[in-house]
Image (tube, coloured by chain):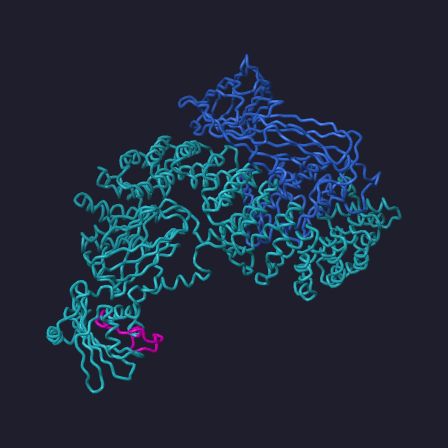
Amino acid sequence: MTDSKYFTTTKKGEIFELKAELNSDKKEKKKEAVKKVIASMTVGKDVSALFPDVVNCMQTDNLELKKLVYLYLMNYAKSQPDMAIMAVNTFVKDCEDPNPLIRALAVRTMGCIRVDKITEYLCEPLRKCLKDEDPYVRKTAAVCVAKLHDINAQLVEDQGFLDTLKDLISDSNPMVVANAVAALSEIAESHPNSNLLDLNPQTINKLLTALNECTEWGQIFILDCLANYTPRDDRESQSICERVTPRLSHANSAVVLSAVKVLMKFMEMLPKDLDYYGTLLKKLAPPLVTLLSAEPELQYVALRNINLIVQRRPEILKHEMKVFFVKYNDPIYVKLEKLDIMIRLASQANIAQVLAELKEYATEVDVDFVRKAVRAIGRCAIKVEQSAERCVSTLLDLIQTKVNYVVQEAIVVIKDIFRKYPNKYESVIATLCENLDSLDEPEARAAMIWIVGEYAERIDNADELLESFLEGFHDESTQVQLQLLTGIVKLFLKKPTETQELVQQVLSLATQDSDNPDLRDRGYIYWRLLSTDPVAAKEVVLAEKPLISEETDLIEPTLLEELICHIGTLASVYHKPPSAFVEGSRGVQHKRLPGSSVESPEPASAAVPEASPSIIPSQGDLLGDLLNLDLTPPTSTAAPPPTSGLQMGAMDLLGGGLDSLVRPRVLVSSQMWLPAMKGKGLEISGTFARRSGVIQMEMTLTNKAMSVMTDFAIQFNRNSFGLAPAGPLQVLTPLSPNQSIEVSLPLNTLGPIMKMDPLNNLQVAVKNNIDVFYFSCQYPMSVLFSEDGKMESKVFLVTWKDIPNDNETQCQIKDCHLNSDAASNKLQGSNVFTIAKRTVEGQDMLYQSLKLTNGIWVLAELKVQTGSPVFTVSISTKVPWRSRHGQQSDSVVPP
Amino acid sequence: MIHSLFLINNTGDIFLEKHWKSVIGRSVCDYFFEAKDKAGDPENVPPVLQTPHHYLISIYRGKLFLLSVIQSEVSPLFVIEFLHRVADTIQDYFGECSENVIKENLVIVYELLEEMLDNGFPLATESNVLKEMIRPPNILRSVVNTLTDTLPTGQLSNVPWRRAGVKYTNNEAYFDVIEEIDAIIDKSGTTVFAEIQGAIEACVRLTGIPDLTLSFMNPRLLDDVSFHPCVRFKRWEAERVLSFIPPDGNFTLMTYHISSQNLVAIPVYVKQNISFFDTASCGRLDITIGPKQTMGKMVEGLSVTIPMPKSVHSANLTATQGSYTFDLATKVLVWDIGKLNPQKLPNLKGSLSIQSGVPKPEENPSLSIGLKVQQLAISGIKVNRLDMYGEKYKPFKGVKYVTKAGKFQVRT
């Protein structure tokens, strides 16, 4: 007997027949009739005309019949709201039934009838059911609150159902607790700030107790809720972890992953030297591995999460490489994810195995997978230096297969390998060139052209090769065109005699025959460079390139932290924060790991000091800063910002110098120079100071990435005062994740000089095993004031007179509540010396001198009107800056 | 939580839909169909899809897609687990989970879905609870209306997996220790990767509320385990015994996973040579299988499945034992061998012809091996004893071991 018989009546008047059967006296016949109705309904036939007849069957003591009628009601009540009211009485009556199953069924069905008129009648029965003596009814009622909230949120709040729901968290029955948590979590999603789930140690304890006794689904809800809690200290954290760990052995993979989430989050609070921390790490690996033997859909979600976990804590799965080996009949989405994780886990210890696997994959059928496998080989070469040679030879083997897309992928990654290890594997270029003709993808063509251009001097027929590309210049994609332009210019700079014609040709193609603005601009720039200053052109075009980093697709640390808090959710599958895709962006709160070392919750505060150094200090605020006086807002101070170059320079100098007088020898505020986001996890903040005649660059290096950082080195760009490191950067021990180190780097002023704008700007490159990072910072001028800056008073007088008026600049400092002596003392602390002092008409005149590290003397006259907070400063220096535009000179700084 | 469910067959027809909240139009499935077309093979459809307003999470089972529609941030594993549970339940009720069976039992399936989920929250997913509320069709429910109108006891008890008042005349408890070997063997015969996926499948028909304890001779082998909710985890942690009140009927008591290579014995070796000639449009195939580590047991049910490159046209082979088939549409070669006779090793040999004008295949096909070894758990795990507490009668007990090939692949 199957349900298919219900579909056999296709005669006319089917509805009529059903109607008659529904009104039959015989129970059995009635039930069969309702079933026929439901069967028609499920396949989309319209049986709404039978509404009154079906509703009439509702008043029965036969549970099965009642349920069928309810099914029908839920489906059609929306389209027949007036008739649905007819059913209300029965519902209300059923909510009082002595049988808990019927009470629960009634309240459950009522909640599913999404008709406003009915919801009003629902409130009273629901209130009773929430306090029902039978836990089955309470548990059903808890879910009903969530349903009602979805239909009419205001009603739920007005009726106080939320409070009742919160009380249910303390219910004696674990299933009720679980459902209350689930309902509250769902409601909370639309009220992000409602604090509905107010978690405190007492409720946490109740949840943990319920966790052991409720169903697998309830465990998921409770674990997800627990993950939102922030333990007070590491002891609480550990005790929660201990009680959650048994869930790792649950057969339901969702329970396992939710437990992993809780543990990954709370682990952050445990001290790393704790024995338990190590135990916990060990316990996490087996369940993650087990997830990979489940159905492919589960595997996929698990792999996406494992990808996050290995980035955060690579140590958990570092010995489990093999479980990620790809089986030929894995679905493609599983294969690609496994490959990704294999590369993340690749290390010197297992690279041989990984490479053997990757080579195997590169001969598979699936094109996408093969391509990714070839790329992976390149990534391995870049990641594990010791393996680079083997990777290159593997890639060469693959090129020999002559499979078109394999060859192209291989060439693209070999280009990256050249970038990472310059002048090491050029012997393979010949092999690459053999395959020139088979390249039809832009990325591969561009890569090949780059290689030819970069190594033009070693390829005898480089000009011919590039010329062959040039023929179809206009049919190439922009990527290839740009590369070709640069490649030929490189070639020209290396072999100018033979390639003049070629370079002319490409320049005119790029500048005259192209619509692409990028291409034209680049073409013009090269053209000008080549025609005006070929030496400069060489420096620009053939400049040494920064090495490329090994992990190109690491998730940015702050995002990673947030995603770790969302393990097991959609966010973890998409690797995007929920705020980026949750419907209607209901103001999802950003979650953070507890006790992690990433900057305080206001990332803005970290960004501000980063931005400020690049602003040229305006005269006002710097002078206002003088002598630690009340610092007034820049707008209200002194003269308007200077416009002439002369004033600029002087202000910079003075400003910077005097600025630091405010502070003691050690500059207090260290500034964020390189935020972790830009430094692939390396964060650098720092400051400058002058200590016993030596300029010190004081830096705090923090590793916010997941892997250990080593091999630090530092370099400066040419700068105004020739600042250069006096020794290597002293970071002797590797910097492990979340570790900070303070380094003091002595500087000298013997480096090459180039005028910077602003004057005190310093461009720094810091290298580590990951990459090279660039940032610029500004040093206070006062670090350049040398200790022997006191001028003989006679000399001072002569010099002062000698300096042409053009080199003098004046400004005022307001709100300086210091007398002249105090000011003089303060300035002396910064190597600004008072040579003489005289008093004229109640005005104190201080004559001062300072000497810059490059031997330039700067003289100043400070007028202090007793009782007036305004200082007038005149600054002069003998050496005028190279004068441009006639009389305007940049003062103070020598070329 | 789970908003709606669509059941979709292989050709892309939606033949059942169920909404637990408001109704979502069928058009939402268009995104899925798009992804399905793109994936080509139904196995390759990504399980989690994003659409502008919804998320689609699907599983593929028995040539059916179970597609759920989600509107809020939710745990995808929870949804996937639930969908598999739906498929399991249908299988449990009707013997298989297929389009025909569902269409024949639409009303029951619909009732089941209603009972399994309430407002998107799982309500009753335990087979024994469901069966008390919705009778499977094999029990003549129209004749004897035995459906309880009281609350199924499992719904609220601490042991939701067991119903009360179970009575049997023959009390019996059988445990099958089933181990599957997942392995990748490379062309030279070296094991690249091997692990054992073990499971203890139980069939328990015992009266009352029995409390069972199962212990192993060598529990140390098991360090990566997942248990049915009935197993008391604390006892396992402390004493390494399985203590539990079993569900009634068939269930998986535990699964385990043994990955340490030295414990995984590989029962057979495969000598293979599949090659294609550069010049002529043909190739050669030669496969021999022999016993390796069989622990003195007979290897049965031996089979080899080879998905041939698409350009292979036909196969002309001779098997010394068993028979082979080559499916021209899917290009899958299956060689059914049967028992492995160590004295006379089975061999399959002959030529493969390739479509003319097509270049020789670039990829090397992998071999999937199927096999079975009775009365052997390849990891060496052994049940020590089974004790029953809480009931007076003497049950009949039995333990069986079997080892099978899981994803056992040989690369060429």
Q: Is residue A97 above or below residue B210?
A: below
In the image, is A447 to the left or to the right of B167?
left
Is A688 in front, or is B27?
A688
Whether residue B52 is in magenta: the answer is no
Q: Which residues are magenta?
A: A624-649
Q: Is residue A526 above or below residue A362?
A: below
Residue lying farthest top? Answer: B343
Chain coloured blue: B
Left or right of A741, for residue B123:
right
Closer-to-camera residue (B135/B245): B245
> In which quadrant of the rendered image does the C terminus of chain A lie?
bottom left
Instruction: Give residue A458's quadrant in the image.
Output: top left
* Residue A288 drawn at (x, y percent): 53, 40
Q: Quadrant of residue A297?
A: top right
Is A642 inside the magenta-drawn segment?
Answer: yes
Quadrant containing the N terminus of chain A is: top right
Outermost residue to the bottom: A841
Q: Colour of chain A?
A: cyan
Q: Residue at x 52, y 16 (%)?
A: B347
